[in-house]
Image (cartoon, rainbow, N blue to C red):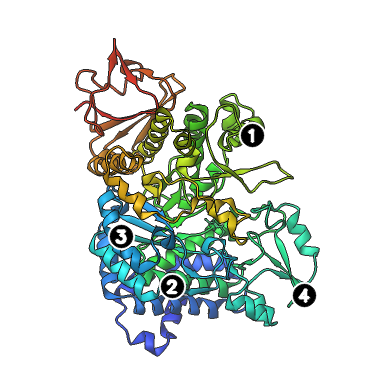
Amino acid sequence: MYEQVSHSLLNEILTDLKPEILEEDLRHFYTRLGANFYSIHSLFVILYGKRDDFKVQMQKLVETMAGQYIQRPANLKQIDLARENDHNWFLSQEWVGMAQYADGYAKNLSELQQHVQYFLELGVNMIHLMPMLVCPQGASDGGYAVSDFRQIDQRFGSLEDLHNLAEEFHKYGILLTLDVVLNHTSNEHEWAQKAKAGYSKYQDYYYIFDNREVPDMFEMTMPEVFPETASGNFTWDEAMEKWVMTVFNNYQWDLNFSNPEVFIEMLDIILYWANQGADILRLDAVAFLWKKIGSICQNEREAHLLLQLMKDCCQVTAPGVLFIAEAIVAPVEIIKYFGEDAINAKECEIAYNASLMALLWDAVATKSARLLMQGIKSLPDKLERATWLNYVRCHDDIGLGYDNNDIRAVDYEPHAHRQFLIDYYTGKYGESSSRGLPFGHNDKTGDTRISGSLASLVGLEAALDSGDQSEIDNAIKIILLLHGLILSFGGIPLLYYGDEIGTLNDNSYLEDPAKANDSRWAHRPHINWEKAELRNTPGTVEYKLFSALKKMIAVRKEISAFADFNNRELLDVGNPHLFVFERFEYVQPANRVLVVTNFDDVPQHLNLADIGRKVHFRNDTIRDLYSGEKPAMFKEDLVIPPYRFYWLTDQ
Ligand code: GLC
């Protein structure tokens, strides 16, 4: 949009650009800057407009974008142009992701490159590598306590190894996703070290206080993220003799985004990783970016404005690069990370669907889809050109972040219901064979979250121990059922490494004092490649899972109704055990697929005539796209076997 105040400032900025920037061919840069400048300027004014150095910072911001544009490799600039032309590219059903620790999946980056065939075999074509940057020894929070935002830890290899991997990925059409940990640095980061040494410039990079006055005010409303290991949100620093805000672990210092220098530094880092070949950047803990006394310091309006500004700036320099919002917050809040009051996504194009994830775990434990149905029904439609990252497990715990109103709407009492889920997944409830572990118990609120690998949570570990074949088969069916949902729901399915071969909890973390008090390490495995080989041996668990997932992925890619264009309709079929929805093709709604899942351990009936007049699936021609089979019928009803999913068509 053309607007005179911002445009005259833009003219001034462009005239004053450093000579080395002026010399470059910046044609595409200038058109994109012109298109986004009004928005960039408006956001920068709201966030930093009251500062005396506003203009200086604005100049620096533009020079940062231009500097990184000049650095951007030509092949990536080509990709930017191609994606501009094909702007819905990431909504296609052809994308299937997998998240992994590079040093858990392989030894390091170069060994990982040797396993690219494994991804191709399974069909995953978007790999999220968890953070690999330099961290403090031991106190790393799994890579999320970064000491140098540009330096890959030598355990993983070098920047060159990453370039080689990115090139290899691109050769095979695999997207590379990398993390940018925006909210905090480790206490060993150069900025933190300089702050400790007394430099006020760097003390302003963080939230640092001389005494408890302000921290105590914050504490009145701020929840605790890791109550067991890092109680409170502030840490006393001996060197400075001051309090530092540390919302996560005490070695993770929160960055002060009310300082534009911090914004510009972090934008530079985002663009730096975009330039190293990342197609997608996972922005960590985005809900926490803005702190305000009297609030929970999550989901603040300014956190959204910061993300919008980052997106606007990234579109100028590297428009082909997408953002994933990692905001594990209340269902109604998550959706706002696509950007509110817009048509197209204007913050992050992709967001973790933590709501679906948690609801799936409810359905498994209760054998009922009631809360799942209610929770999904309550979610507003997302924006256009925005998509979910649908997952069952990831490197973090499972938080029971349901909306209490939804829990009550299906006649559970919120506290008692959450307690049931905790007991169920930690194996304390009735005959539950789940081997989950409690995580993040908070004595004050009674909250607990759950760790554990998918296979151990659904009872595979217990079944293998007891040798009960039918229990083993049930656990396999549940794993496939859950994947059947994330592969068809709408969005990019994100598998978690190891789940495709039924990896169990790894309790060796208990022997490492730096990890022992964080049960999330139980599900951050080192892949056992000998076990992974068993995927080729019929009859093994690894084979059953891997070959089924491989087929599901291949079939998903062929079903255009599974692309994500708000083309899903939930169907209430009056049977609490079944979760049923229709997916239809955006351009040709008549091309549709009926997704039917049964969470119960006994067969359930479904009468196609009962599910509303919109859906007239024909009994005589109905068949499952995954198995190619026609479901069994009893009179006029389809019979849905226990823990079974169907992707039904009648064409
Ligand atoms: C994100 C990460 C989690 C980490 C936290 C703090 O939630 O997924 O692993 O502990 O951020 O960085």
Q: Is residue 99 above or below residue 154?
A: above
- Percent x, y for residue 148? 52, 74
Q: Residues within 10 Å of mark 2 (few under 14, many from 20)?
A: some
Q: Residues within 10 Å of mark 1 (few under 14, many from 20)?
A: some
Residue position for label 4: 241
Q: Is residue 98 left or right of residue 432?
A: left
Q: Earlier in the sequence, mark 1 or mark 3?
A: 3
Q: Going 42% across and 56% down the picture, which residue do you hit?
A: 100
Where is residue 117 drawn, in percent x and y? 26, 57
Q: Nearer the viewer, residue 530 or 390?
A: 530
First reached walking from the N terminus: tag 2 or tag 1: 2
- Residue 106 location (% of width, % of height): 38, 61
Query: What is the spatial separation of the Cα atoms under label 2 and label 4, in whole angstroms?
Result: 46 Å
Q: Are marks 1 and 3 in contact (CB under 8 Å)?
A: no
User: In front of the other: label 1 or label 3?
Assistant: 3
Q: Secondary structure at mark 2?
A: helix
**Badge 3: how crowded within 10 Å, few (<14), some, or many (20+)?**
few
Farthest bottom residue in view: 19
Q: Height in image: 241 above or below 391?
A: below
> Rounded to the nearest whole Å, what is the CA distance between mark 2 and mark 3?
50 Å
Apparent side of residue 55 relative to residue 595 in the rendered image (left or right)? right
The type of residue carrying mark 4 is Glu
